[in-house]
């Protein structure tokens, strides 16, 4: 039983050491990690806009521009025309 407890203690020490070591690594390299993530996000954002930072018309009209691009359903009722104003 003593041997099992010793093995568990050594394993616990190894896991605790790994957690502390990885925490120190992240703390020491936090600026380079943040810069790397920022550059990946910017590359992904600019890449979705057409690549190389071009913002003009590279999507090929795939996105709708407004409500006028959407066709009304076939079974919808027509909107009645406005009547002449009533004078009192």
Image (spheres, rainbow, N blue to C red):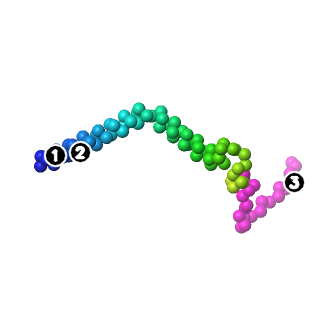
> Would you say residue 70 is visible in this rendering?
yes
Question: SS at mark 2?
Answer: helix
Residue drawn at x 28%, y 43% is 15
Residue drawn at x 58%, y 46% is 44
Residue 46, how many percent across, how many down? 62, 44
Residue, disc 2: 11
> Would you say residue 64 is visible in this rendering?
no
Residue 28, how many percent across, how many down? 41, 32
Residue, disc 3: 84
Does the magenta portion include 23?
Answer: no
Residue, disc 1: 5
Residue drawn at x 72%, y 58% is 70
Instruction: Give the answer, above or below, for where 28 lies relative to 84.
Output: above
Between disc 1 and disc 2, whose residue precedes? Answer: 1
Closer to the camera in the image, 71 or 6: 6
What are the residue bounds of the magenta stretch? 64-88
Residue 62, how many percent across, how many down? 69, 55
Residue drawn at x 36%, y 34% is 24
Instruction: Give the answer, above or below, for where 83 lies relative to 12.
Output: below
Q: Residues within 10 Å of mark 1 (few under 14, many from 20)?
A: few
Q: Residues within 10 Å of mark 3 (few under 14, many from 20)?
A: few
């Amino acid at each position: 039983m003593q041997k099992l407890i010793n093995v568990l203690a050594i394993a616990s020490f190894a896991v605790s050491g790994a957690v502390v070591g990885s925490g120190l690594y992240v703390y020491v390299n936090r600026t380079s990690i943040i810069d790397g993530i920022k550059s990946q996000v910017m590359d992904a954002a600019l890449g979705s806009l057409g690549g190389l930072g071009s913002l003009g018309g590279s999507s090929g009209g795939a996105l709708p521009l407004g409500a006028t691009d959407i066709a009304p359903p076939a079974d919808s009722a027509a909107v009645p025309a406005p009547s002449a104003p009533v004078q009192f």
